[in-house]
Amino acid sequence: MRILLAMGLALSMYYIFCLIFFNVTPEITGYHILYTTNFPDLFAIPAFIVYLIVTITPLFVSSIKRTHLMAILMFISCLITALFFTQYLISVWCFFAALISGVIFWILRDSKKAFNFNKLSLLKIRSDINFKS
């Protein structure tokens, strides 16, 4: 997970750099949002691959039940978007992500039922004791 974190941080720095020094122009075409950028072409595909790795892989290895389902849905939606909406990849995949966010609600609702709130109370009591010492 630390490797994925480092990759994600590096990718974030790259995208921050690109957003500061290059243009992004959104426009509505074909009932979609088209983002035109002049980011370096050399890094476009590798950056996208790293993005996929750091956003989807943690869901496959998470100890939280059913996150693997969300990972599969994200991967399939990305694949569909890349095949059929290549030009509008960013906006269409974000649309799919909005739909998939319902799965997040389902996962959190079920994990809340399984979560033992008594453990949380014990942690709070222990931290209060340690803080007072």
Image (cartoon, grey):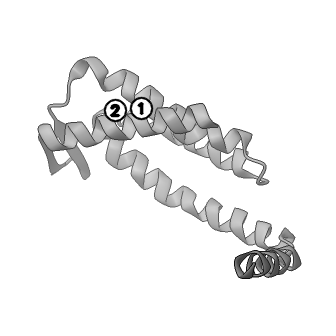
* Amino acid at dot 1: Ala
Residue 107: % across, % down: 71, 62
Residue identified by numbered label 2: 86
Q: Residues within 10 Å of mark 1 (few under 14, many from 20)?
A: some
Residue 94: % across, % down: 41, 51
Q: Is residue 22 left or right of residue 86?
A: left
Q: Is residue 113 left or right of residue 17?
A: right
Looking at the image, which residue is at 76% across and 79% down?
A: 124
For the N terminus, the image quarter is: top right
Q: Is residue 47 left or right of residue 73?
A: left
How far apart marks 1 and 2 lie (CA) works out to: 5 Å
Residue 77: % across, % down: 52, 42
Q: Residues within 10 Å of mark 2 (few under 14, many from 20)?
A: some
Looking at the image, which residue is at 46% across and 29% down?
A: 50
Residue identified by numbered label 1: 82
Placement of 116 over or under 17, stated as above or below: below
* Amino acid at dot 2: Thr
Residue 49 marker: none
Residue 113: % across, % down: 83, 74
Looking at the image, which residue is at 54% across and 32% down?
A: 53
User: Quick check: can you spot residue 83?
Assistant: no
For the C terminus, the image quarter is: bottom right
Residue farthest toward the top in the current orientation of the protein: 42
The quadrant in which residue 23 appears is top left
Residue farthest toward the front in the current orientation of the protein: 133
Placement of 93 over or under 10, stated as above or below: below
Query: Which secondary structure, mark 2?
Result: helix
Which of 64/117 is in front?
117
Query: Which secondary structure, mark 1?
Result: helix
Placement of 22 over or under 129, stated as above or below: above
Q: Are marks 1 and 2 in contact (CB under 8 Å)?
A: yes
Which of 90/6 is in front?
6
